[in-house]
């Protein structure tokens, strides 16, 4: 009886592990990704009805990129430290918010637009500002600390 139970459990574990395999993107998508991000690590794919999403790390930056089924990049999201912002944007933000500590950036590219969502804090507030690629900025969200 123990042997039968062991074999059954082993079979279920094997089937379950195959059921959760990541999708393989088509050749066009894979070629486009590999040409752009040759040194990507921790690559994980997800497939949706009309597009693929790939999450990965490249150059210490965590990223997520969406590709249509033809291999065209639709948009991207990158997460990184403020010191990796373009120097002009970083200088502008530090000048506009000298008493705040910057601690994170979410960069979103979609529909031909690039926006930076910069997280910062001071003793009383957590603030996120939205900065476009030309440097226009606005407060996106603001939360009072406990």
Image (cartoon, rainbow, N blue to C red):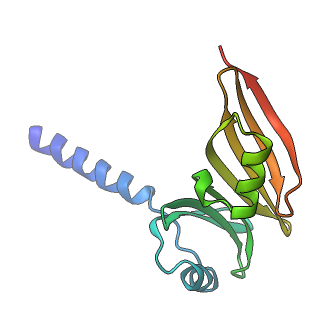
At x 65% / y 66%, what residue is drawn? 65
Judge whether 96 appears above or below 88 on screen. above
The reply, left or right, for residue 55 in relation to residue 142 is left
State the image coordinates of residue 134 (x, y, percent, origin top left): 86, 63
Residue 76: image quadrant is: bottom right
- At a point 80% along the width and 43% down the height, the residue shown is 96
- The reply to whether residue 1 is in sight is no
Q: Report whether residue 79 is seen.
A: yes
Where's residue 111, x and y in %? 86, 66
**Residue at (71%, 77%) from the top-left corner?**
69
Please name whichever residue, 28 or 65, is drawn nearer the observer in this view of the structure: 65
The C terminus sits in image quarter: top right
Give coordinates of residue 128: x percent, y percent.
Answer: 75, 39
Asked if 13 appears above or below 35 in the picture, the reply is: above
Q: Is residue 144 left or right of residue 123?
A: right
Identify the residue at horizontal 10%, vertical 38% (top origin).
Answer: 2
Q: Residue 122: where, in percent of width, then height?
A: 67, 28
């Amino acid at each position: 009886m123990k042997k039968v139970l062991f074999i059954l459990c082993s079979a279920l574990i094997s089937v379950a592990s195959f059921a959760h395999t990541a999708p393989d993107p088509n050749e066009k998508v894979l070629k486009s990704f590999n040409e752009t991000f040759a040194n990507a690590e921790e690559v994980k794919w997800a497939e949706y009805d009309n597009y693929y999403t790939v999450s990965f790390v490249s150059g210490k930056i965590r990223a997520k990129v969406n590709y249509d089924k033809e291999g065209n990049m639709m948009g991207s999201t990158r997460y990184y430290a403020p010191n990796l912002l373009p120097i002009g944007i970083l200088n502008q933000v530090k000048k506009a918010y000298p008493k705040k500590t910057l601690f994170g950036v979410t960069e979103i590219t979609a529909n031909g637009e690039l926006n930076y969502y910069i997280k910062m804090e001071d003793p009383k507030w957590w603030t996120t500002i939205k900065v476009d690629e030309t440097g226009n900025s606005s407060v996106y969200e603001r939360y009072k600390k406990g």
